[in-house]
Image (tube, rainbow, N blue to C red):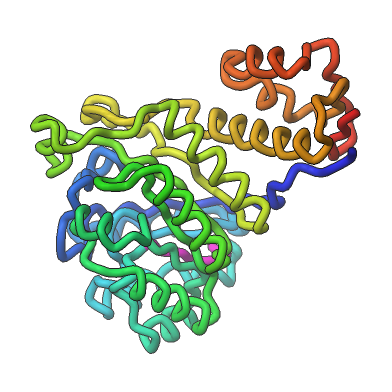
C-alpha cells in the first residue's frame, strides 16, 4: 500500500504580529488572560499605531511581512481605527514591505460593509475566535454568541472574498472529547483556509482560575488533549485544511501565570505524532493485518516514534520494530 501524508502544503508567511490585548473586547471570557498569552501589557491604540508605524518605516523594502492584528477584537474597534491600522499596513505594499494584512476577531463582531472597505485597503484574512460550536459550552464560557452566529460570520467572511481562519479551544467548561470531535466535523464542513488549535489553560486572575480553585472546573489532561487533538488534526488534514498553530506559544511570563491545564512546549510535535499514528492505524485496518515493513519519508521518522519515544511500545505491540522501518527520500509512505 502506497499513500501520501495528508497534511496540506504550507507556505509560511513572514508574520509581523501587532498585539492589542483586550482592545475592542466588550466582555472578558472566563479563560481569558491575554497579557500572559501575548507577553504584552495593555496599551492605548495610539501607542500601538505609532509603534507599528515605526516598525514599518524601519523595515527593509521587500521584507514581505503579513501584518497580523492579534489579541483583541479587531472589528469591534471604532471603525476609524480599523481603517487607520489596515491603511497603515496597506500603504507599504508598494515597496514590498507588506504583502497582506490579517486580523483576529469574534464571530459576533462583523459588519459586511465595513469588511468590504477593509478588504479594499489590504485586509486579506479574518481569523474568527470560534472556540466551540456547542451552545451550552459557549454559554458556560460567557462567549455571548451561538452556533448560528458562527456560521453566519463565516459566510460573511467568504462573501466579502477574504480568507477564513477558525480558532478552536478544546477543553472549555462543559466540553468533552465528543463535543470537540463534533467541533472538528463542523469546522471541516465550513472549509476554512486555516485553523488554530489552542487547548484551554487556566491562568491566574481569571474566572476559570476561581472555578479551578473551587473544584468547579477540571482541565483536560495532557494525554487526553494530545489524543483528541491528534484525531482532530488528521480529520482537518484529510479535508485539505491547514493547521497553522497547535498550543499556546511560550511567551515571557506565561509559565509564571499558568495554574493548570495541558500545556507542553512540544505540544505541536506531540499532536502531529498522534495524528500520524491515527493515520497509520487507519491504513493497517484497510490492510486488515499488521504491516511487516514501513517505508516512510525521513522527515516523519521522529513523529513516528513520538516525543521521547512515546509510541515505541505501541508499535512494538503491533509487531513493528525499528529494524522494520526504513526511511527514504520519496514523499510518500509504503506499507508491506
In this rendering, is residue 142 above or below 227? below
- In percent of the image, x 23 and y 25: which residue is there? 256
Q: Which quadrant does the C terminus fall into?
A: top right
- In percent of the image, x 27 and y 79: which residue is there? 79
Residue pushed farthest bottom? 113
- In percent of the image, x 40 and y 27: which residue is there? 222
Foreground of the two, 201 or 287: 287
In this rendering, is residue 273 above or below 117? above
Magenta segment includes 100: yes
Can residue 137 be spotted in the picture? Answer: yes
Residue 4 appears at what percent x and percent y?
A: 81, 44
Residue 175 appears at what percent x and percent y?
A: 32, 47
Residue pushed farthest front? 288
Residue 278 appears at what percent x and percent y?
A: 64, 36
Q: Which quadrant does the N terminus fall into?
A: top right
Q: Quadrant of residue 319?
A: top right
- Answer with left or right where residue 268 lies relative to residue 85: right
Can residue 130 be spotted in the picture? Answer: no
What secondary structure is the magenta-colored segment mainly?
A: strand
- Answer with left or right where residue 161 lies relative to residue 176: right
User: Which residues are the magenta region?
Assistant: 98-104
- Answer with left or right where residue 308 lies relative to residue 79: right
Foreground of the two, 63 or 103: 103
Foreground of the two, 77 or 317: 317
- Answer with left or right where residue 276 lies relative to residue 259: right
- In percent of the image, x 71 and y 13: which residue is there? 316
Magenta segment includes 283: no
Residue 281 appears at what percent x and percent y?
A: 70, 33
In this rendering, is residue 121 above or below 239? below
Amino acid at each position: 500500500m502506497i499513500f501520501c501524508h495528508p497534511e496540506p502544503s504550507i507556505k509560511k508567511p513572514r508574520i509581523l504580529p501587532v498585539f492589542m490585548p483586550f482592545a475592542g473586547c466588550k466582555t472578558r471570557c472566563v479563560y481569558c488572560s491575554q497579557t500572559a498569552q501575548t507577553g504584552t501589557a495593555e496599551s492605548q491604540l495610539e501607542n500601538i499605531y505609532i509603534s507599528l508605524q515605526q516598525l514599518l518605516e524601519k523595515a527593509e523594502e521587500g521584507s514581505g511581512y503579513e501584518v497580523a492584528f492579534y489579541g483583541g477584537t479587531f472589528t469591534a474597534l471604532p471603525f476609524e481605527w480599523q481603517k487607520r491600522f489596515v491603511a497603515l499596513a496597506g500603504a507599504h505594499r508598494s515597496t514590498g514591505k507588506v504583502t497582506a494584512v490579517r486580523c483576529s476577531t469574534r464571530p459576533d463582531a462583523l459588519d459586511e460593509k465595513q469588511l468590504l472597505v477593509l478588504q479594499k485597503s489590504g485586509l486579506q484574512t479574518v481569523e474568527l475566535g470560534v472556540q466551540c460550536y456547542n451552545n451550552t459550552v459557549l454559554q458556560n464560557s460567557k462567549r455571548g454568541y451561538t452556533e448560528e452566529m458562527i456560521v453566519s460570520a463565516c459566510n460573511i467572511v467568504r462573501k466579502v472574498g477574504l480568507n477564513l481562519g477558525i480558532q478552536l479551544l478544546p477543553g472549555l467548561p462543559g466540553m468533552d472529547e465528543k463535543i470537540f470531535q463534533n467541533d472538528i466535523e463542523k469546522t471541516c464542513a465550513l472549509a476554512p483556509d486555516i485553523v488554530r488549535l489552542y487547548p484551554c489553560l487556566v491562568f491566574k486572575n481569571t474566572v476559570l482560575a476561581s472555578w479551578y480553585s473551587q473544584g468547579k472546573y477540571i482541565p483536560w489532561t495532557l494525554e487526553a488533549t494530545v489524543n483528541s487533538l491528534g484525531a482532530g488534526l488528521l480529520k482537518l488534514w484529510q479535508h485539505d485544511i491547514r493547521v497553522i498553530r497547535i498550543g499556546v506559544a511560550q511567551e515571557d511570563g506565561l509559565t509564571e501565570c499558568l495554574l493548570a491545564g495541558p500545556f507542553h512546549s512540544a505540544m505541536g510535535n506531540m499532536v502531529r505524532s498522534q495524528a500520524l499514528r491515527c493515520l497509520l492505524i487507519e491504513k493497517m485496518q484497510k490492510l486488515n493485518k499488521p504491516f511487516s515493513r514501513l517505508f516512510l519519508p525521513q522527515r516523519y521518522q521522529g513523529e513516528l516514534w513520538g516525543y521521547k519515544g512515546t509510541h515505541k511500545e505501541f508499535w512494538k505491540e503491533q509487531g513493528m520494530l525499528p529494524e522494520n522501518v526504513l526511511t527514504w527520500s520519496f514523499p510518500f509512505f509504503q506499507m508491506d
